[in-house]
Image (cartoon, rainbow, N blue to C red):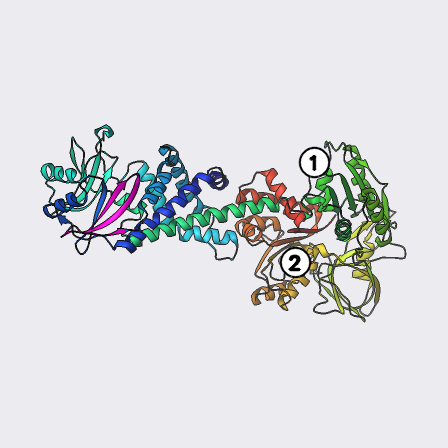
Amino acid sequence: MVKKTLIWMHRWLTLLLLPLFALIIVTGAILSFAPIIKDSASGPPAREPVEVAALLPILSQVDPQSRSRALELEEPGIIVVEFSRRGAREWHAFDMVTGQHLKKRAIGADFFHTVQGLHKHLLLDLDIVVDIATYLMVLVIIVGPLLAWPRLRNTLVGWHTVLGWVGFPLVLMVSATGVMMALALGTPQFPQVDRDQGRMPMALAIQRAVEHGGLTHVKDTRRLETAAVAINGRAGEEAAAFVVTRDDVTRVGSYPGLVTELHEGTWAGGWSGGLNLVASVLLMVLMVTGLVSWGRRGLQSRRRTGDADADILVAWASQTGTAARLAQATTEALRQGGARVMGASLAGLNPSELKGFRRVFLIASTAGDGQVPEPARGFVKALEGADLADCRFALLALGDSSYTHFCAGGLTLRDALQRAGAEECLPLVKVDRDPAGPWGQWLRDVGRTLGVTPGAVEAPRQDQPVTLTLEKRRQLNDPEDPVTHEVWSLEWRSADPLSFRPGDLLLVSPGKGEPGRPYSIGSSSELEPHRILLTVALTTRQDAEGKTCWGKASGLLCRGFKQGDTLEATLRPHTDFNPPDDPARPMIMIAAGCGIAPFVGFIREQAEGVRTGPAWLIFGNRKRAGDYFYGEQLEQWHAHGALTRLDTAFSRDPLGGGYVQDVMRSQAPMLWEWLEDRNAVLYACGNAHTLGEGVRQALVEILQQQGGLDQEAARARLRAWESEGRLRFDLID
């Protein structure tokens, strides 16, 4: 809760006061140039003050009208005087022996005076506004390093964090001294000045300090508030500073004081001004990188494919990727025909967004035993109580008539939309297995409804029949341990080279006319085009007589096939669950039990150099000794660097670490860094009700804890990430 509050404070104070912060920082950066330019134009100030007796005659000679505002001494024997003439300010140098005018100093005194007015009071005597903004800026600066430890990573937030830590002392010094000046802490206590007394001449002020304060030598002077003059010098052998008015000569500890010199960057001439400039630049960079990072997160949460001004929405509910590929092809075809189209997964949409489109076209598949695909279930639930009156939609439902609940997922989605008030603009189309033909006709009907001719876009790559021979089989669990589930590693070989990626699916039909059951492939044709690796758990079911028996497909694979047997199956692309397209993009893999199946192929590609980005596996099961599937190989991959991180959880072991979601919570800062700062893709594979719900809940908590979001905002962020493909789930019921 403390960190959440600090994140909120750090972010929203900066956003709300951004214009004022920016003005203070930019004007501070400009003022940092004043001592730098002064050093380069006139050299550093003299170290030793000059005797009053030598200074006063020269000052009277060069300033007969008493218009000087400040003076400084230079070596050897040069006095530099600031004049105010017709509202402008200029610096001029004079020879202290002859009083000869040497040259005008090009240090932009008038310009810096105006900038200083902006910096201190916005040129409107709003000192209190600037003071409060300065207090809050210091608070933001102090809070920043408390939010994250510095880690060297080449990301925007990574650089923001590192720069915040590295520049913290310098940035805090400049900002905190501003607060101290506003609070009059560590600065000279000046007497009250009556501005009505009129201008105090510089020469007169020096003379009064001689008479009433014992001033003998002068180092520099500066007019304060018109009616007073501050003088730095010596009284005999002792350093002394005075503030002189027409009524009083007050000796002060120092002028302007170390706090002011630190803030203004004048304590060491040009060098200190340079340090202040670096501090100002760091503050500007931190402000810009923080703002861009926040803005980018906001844009990512709204990101869709297609046209920003779209009035047509093509959305999908996909389990294995077929519906997503068809929807993306639909989006492209309609765009080529001249329509303004946006494509999005239902996982990243709110029902209310549908009302913003003239027409909505949906492609939905069916999962499990007639359910809506897992990524779209949140959307369907959100439709309860939604008002979609005036929303016009059409739906293409994908299915397989060999299943009892043919196209039930699409029908459920359609019914929920109609209960919310949406109306169909085209009749429902059901697709049996191969969608290429029906999709093409549906696309043409959609085009006619919109008054456009869809472009010539090829149908996405579809299922491919394959013939495989079982080459090797190995039991992965301990057969002597009754707590573990029976799981087998099955290696199949094809006579012909195949094209597939880890995460694609092999559909295995347990009998003639039976629908194929999908199994994740744990190998890669980029490494071995003839080899397919499956990891299969033997499941049980109740037959018609109520007896417990093996699952049809899993029983066939685990108990029915022997080495050398042949399998007729179907290869189905599952691009939504393939490794990232960018081989250098980080990926996080979360698996429970047989959910490890596709990730063996992911990591194998890492080990063989197909991928180069960081890889993190979190694996969970019951017992390390009994069902740590591929454990020895995983440990070797980790030791050799193919796996950047490997974390495990074994729920039945006394010190096993619980479940994968417990590991996620324990590694919350690192997970946040990978997801938020390094733009990693997170994959989760396993049971929908245990792993799926557990992972989502853990991510919500991590976003709340590390990102400072409330629960609803965290869930919205997850929906957006899932829509963008940054979260990818392959879950079974």
Residue 177, how many percent across, how many down?
A: 32, 43
Distance between the alpha carbons at the discs numbered 1 and 2: 31 Å
**Residue 122 position (above or below residue 264):** above
Label placed on residue 580: 2
Residue on which the image places disc 1: 352
**Residue 282 position (above or below residue 7):** below
Q: Which residues are magenta?
A: 79-104
Residue 447, how many percent across, how many down?
A: 82, 46
Q: How many marks?
A: 2
Crowdedness near tag 2: few (<14), some (14–19) or many (≥20) residues, C-alpha within 10 Å: many
Residue 629, how many percent across, how many down?
A: 67, 60
**Residue 117 position (above or below residue 496):** above
Q: Secondary structure at mark 2?
A: loop
Answer yes or no: do the residues labelled 1 and 2 have beta carbons within 8 Å? no
Question: Magenta residues: mostly which secondary structure?
Answer: strand
Crowdedness near tag 1: few (<14), some (14–19) or many (≥20) residues, C-alpha within 10 Å: few
